[in-house]
Amino acid sequence: RRDMTRATFSFVKLTVLIALLLMVGEAAFGRNRDVIITTDCGADIDDQFAIAYLSLVPQIHIQAIVTTHAPTLPKQAKTSAECVKDVLQRLAAGTSPPVFAGSDVALATRAPLGNDGVDFIVKTARGHSSQNRLVIITLGATTDVASAFLTDPKLGDRVEILTMGFDSWPKGGDPWNIKNDPLAYQVILGSAAPITIGSTDVTHKYLELSDTGAAQMLSGHGPFAEWLNGLFQNWVTKQSDLVAQVVRPRHWVVWDTVVVAHLLGFTTVETYSRPSLNLPSLEFGHFGKTPANTLNWITSIDQKKMWADFVRRLDRANARR
């Protein structure tokens, strides 16, 4: 009887300990964050994955989505806004955030290009502080974000930037998002805002999917997951030359989901002295002495946990439909 009592007591202690650990983990994992997304949705297929994933996390409060320009978008920010609205309508994950079509062109000077999206960023940030920062996620050209910084010089005290962009550390370089408005990211690097970057080399290493891998992951998880799978399959088929050149045949990288992985704790980072950005080459310039500011560079992604989490959230959303 004493042995049974000890065993029961040990079991209860273990159960309580596990419960406490789960509560602590959930508290760390479930931190509420206000987020504004800027995106060139429609220029690739990764934005659709990232927007859907962000929308499925209750602790991530999307305040607005501001769309931007890219060379392959026929009506620039307007085309991207249509893409975002299509994703949100198909996902049907509750009340949709406002969608603003931002700038159709890159910055030519350090004068802001005003629009409703820029105004919303500035206004929303005023309700935040250095202890409770608004997260601005950049998944494309950062014209509107830079315009917000140029409109309100104190913005960097109330926001943080989470970017998918650049090729690698310490070189920098970029053929896509940063290239579409280099001056804009130069403005961001010169700000006081904390910056975290998920680069091409890291996302390429951890977030590559094959056509069969995407189908196995998404098939059988509801209409929206099937739609995402169809999007992926069409991309690797219709853009076969680009796919083979950038990744390899029938494979693509879902680049932008790195930002969700980071918010959910599925990444590791290194902190470096913040570089300057050389506009002609898009390469980083590194100071001889440590500058006042730093940036966080994502160095790895736990893609197995991330994709499993994404699918679980798709299943939950599908069950609620």
Image (tube, grey):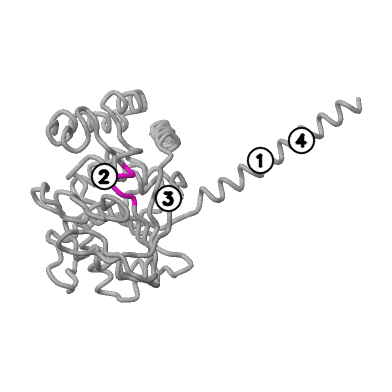
The residue at the point 32 percent across, 26 percent down is: 213
Q: What SS does tag 4 mark?
A: helix
Vertical side of 172 occupied by 15: above or below = above
Check if mark 4's residue and mark 3's residue have beta carbons within 8 Å.
Answer: no
Sequence order check: which comes first, mark 2 or mark 1? 1
Q: Position of residue 314 (x, y in %)?
A: 39, 34
Seen from the viewer's position, the closer of residues 55 and 2 is: 2
Q: Nearer the viewer, mark 4 or mark 3?
A: 3
Kindly report the distance in space between the C-alpha atoms of the residues bearing marks 4 and 3. Answer: 34 Å
The disc placed on residue 19 is 1
Check if mark 2's residue and mark 1's residue have beta carbons within 8 Å.
Answer: no
The residue at the point 27 percent across, 55 percent down is: 171
Which residues are drawn in magenta? 198-203
Sequence order check: which comes first, mark 4 or mark 2? 4
The disc placed on residue 47 is 2
Would residue 23 appear left or right of 175 to someone viewing this image?
A: right
Label 1 crowd (10 A; few <14 / some 14-19 / many >=20): few
- In this view, the residue farthest toward the left is 74
Amino acid under label 4?
Val
Kindly report the distance in space between the C-alpha atoms of the residues bearing marks 4 and 2. Answer: 46 Å
Report if residue 201 lies within the magenta region. Answer: yes
Would residue 67 appear left or right of 199 to someone viewing this image?
A: left
Which residue is under mark 4? 12
